[in-house]
Image (cartoon, grey):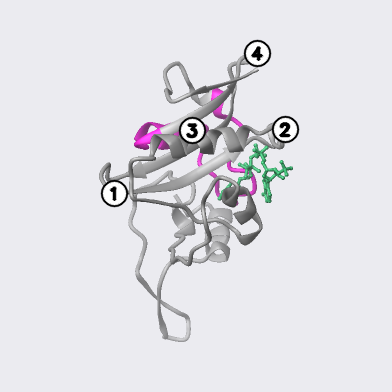
Amino acid sequence: MIIYTDSIGGIGPTDLRGFFVGWPNPPSPDTHLRVLAGSDHLVLARDDASGRVVGYVTAITDGVLAAYIPHLEVLPEYQGQGIGTALMRRMLATLETLYMIDLLCDEDIQPFYARLGMRPATGMMVRNYARQSGASKRPWPQSTRQEDGEVSYGYPTKESCERETNDGASN
Ligand SMILES: CC(C)(COP(=O)(O)OP(=O)(O)OC[C@H]1O[C@@H](n2cnc3c(N)ncnc32)[C@H](O)[C@@H]1OP(=O)(O)O)[C@@H](O)C(=O)NCCC(=O)NCCS
């Protein structure tokens, strides 16, 4: 049976294995626990047979008008059983007194959120892939000089970070 809770009491890193599927530089279970502890709201889905966390959703909020939902994930072997829907329903209920609840997602998943009463919008974002694992708080260079002397501005790309990670220099 799946149990839903808004508490991380009793959860350790070993209960958080298997998440961030497909992330090239994923947070460790320890870092994942810090993400959960640092969120304003969370809902966990736990398999009561094993105690393992099989899905989670987090939100950060100003507590007055706005909230952002950065993470929703269900472990692959538990997907398609309504767990993602149940996590989102609980989170939306928690945030229901607010004016705006935002998240970013790929287009193919918009129908999933539309069924929960959300609607598509246009947004902007930064993804600093050098910080994807959450392992370091070191600031990133805002500008870099290329070999040809040109200075480029902006955030590291996924590709450049994968190169750095492979060189062992990213953290
Ligand atoms: C998105 C996610 C959380 C859904 O969790 P879930 O437990 O499988 O969802 P549910 O079982 O409640 O699915 C409800 C419906 O949404 C649909 N759906 C789920 N994931 C979908 C996806 N990635 N794209 C399109 N539709 C999806 C399902 O087909 C299902 O529809 P159906 O009942 O008509 O078959 C899960 O697929 C997941 O963890 N994906 C990887 C991480 C991710 O993409 N997170 C969202 C970031 S914005």
Tell me the residue that label 1 is attached to: 65
Ranked by sequence position, the earlier of labels 3 and 1 is 1
Ranked by sequence position, the earlier of labels 1 and 2 is 1
Residue at (53, 48) in percent of width and height: 117
Q: Which residues are magenta?
A: 15-41
- Whether tag 2 and tag 4 are in contact, CB under 8 A, the answer is no
For residue 131, side relative to residue 63 (left or right): right
**For the residues marked 4 and 1, what is the alpha-carbon distance in whole angstroms?**
38 Å
For residue 156, side relative to residue 61 (left or right): right
Q: Amino acid at mark 3?
A: Arg
Which quarter of the figure has residue 162? bottom right
**Relative to 166, residue 147 above or below:** below
**For the residues marked 1 and 2, what is the alpha-carbon distance in whole angstroms?**
36 Å
Instruction: Report the quarter where the N terminus lies.
Output: top right
Q: Amino acid at mark 2?
A: Glu
**For the residues marked 2 and 4, what is the alpha-carbon distance in whole angstroms?**
15 Å
Tell me the residue that label 4 is attached to: 49
Judge depth for marks 2 and 3 and give the one in front: 3
Whole-percent x and y of residue 132?
48, 51
* Residue 19 at least partly seen: no
Which residue is nearer to you in this view: 138 or 51?
51
Judge depth for marks 4 and 1 and give the one in front: 1
**For the residues marked 4 and 3, what is the alpha-carbon distance in whole angstroms?**
22 Å
**For the residues marked 2 and 3, what is the alpha-carbon distance in whole angstroms?**
21 Å
Q: Amino acid at mark 1?
A: Leu
Judge depth for marks 1 and 2 and give the one in front: 1
For residue 38, side relative to residue 46 (left or right): left
Disc marking residue 77: 2
Residue at (48, 67) in percent of width and height: 122
- Whether tag 2 and tag 3 are in contact, CB under 8 A, the answer is no
Judge depth for marks 4 and 3 and give the one in front: 3
